[in-house]
Image: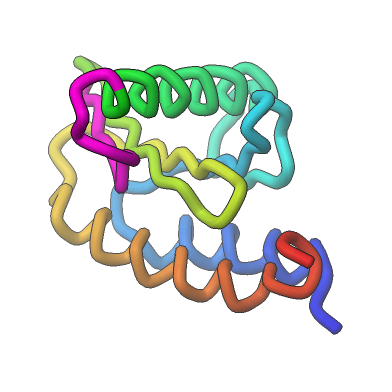
Amino acid sequence: MRSLRDIEERLKEFVSETEGVVGVVLAIPEGLTYSYYSDRAFDPDTISALVASMFSLVKRIGKAAKLNFPKEMSIHLEEGSLHIFPVGELVIGVEALPGVMTGMVLVNTRKMLEELKSIGEEILWT
């Protein structure tokens, strides 16, 4: 049986192998941190709450605009970007530095999401 430790290890691998990514949080829909990893100091609980809130808002916008469920979103800021994706019942936020190749970040994130779904199937979605 897989464990939360396997998810934590995969998040750490993702940050170390994806150029320009400095942190990742996995949050429950209510905004609490499920798991995280970062190369630099940040408050995972604050980021988890914001990621879950942003995803919830975009879900409401999608429903109101009859565009359906959000698949992913990217927010580009002066000091970097935040990419938000659903993963099962959870939401993941990926923090990247400015100037990185967004395409590679997104491709690596999608790959990691598939692995997380596989790892987490026993512990998250049963």
Residue 2, located in which quarter of the rendered image?
Answer: bottom right
Quadrant holding the N terminus: bottom right
Residue 32 to residue 78: above or below: below
The residue that appears at 26% across and 55% down in the rendered structure is 105
Q: Please state the total of marks drawn on the protein image.
A: 0
Relative side of 43 to 50, left or right: right
Q: Nearer the viewer, residue 16 or 43?
A: 43
Residue 32 to residue 5: above or below: above
The residue that appears at 46% across and 38% down in the rendered structure is 93
Relative side of 109 to 48, left or right: left
Indicate the position of residue 51 as horizontal and vertical percent values. Answer: 49, 26
Indicate the position of residue 122 as horizontal and vertical percent values. Answer: 77, 74
Can residue 80 be found in the magenta stretch?
no
The residue that appears at 19% across and 22% down in the rendered structure is 65
Relative side of 13 to 79, left or right: right
Q: By what rule are the colours in the image chosen?
A: rainbow
Indicate the position of residue 38 as horizontal and vertical percent values. Answer: 57, 42
The residue that appears at 16% across and 48% down in the rendered structure is 102
Q: Nearer the viewer, residue 42 or 44?
A: 44
Quadrant holding the C terminus: bottom right
Overall secondary structure of the magenta section? loop
Q: Nearer the viewer, residue 80 or 52?
A: 52
Can residue 68 be found in the magenta stretch?
yes
Relative side of 18 to 115, left or right: left
Residue 32, located in which quarter of the rendered image?
Answer: top right
Magenta-colored span: 64-76
Residue 124 to residue 22: above or below: below
Residue 123, located in which quarter of the rendered image?
Answer: bottom right
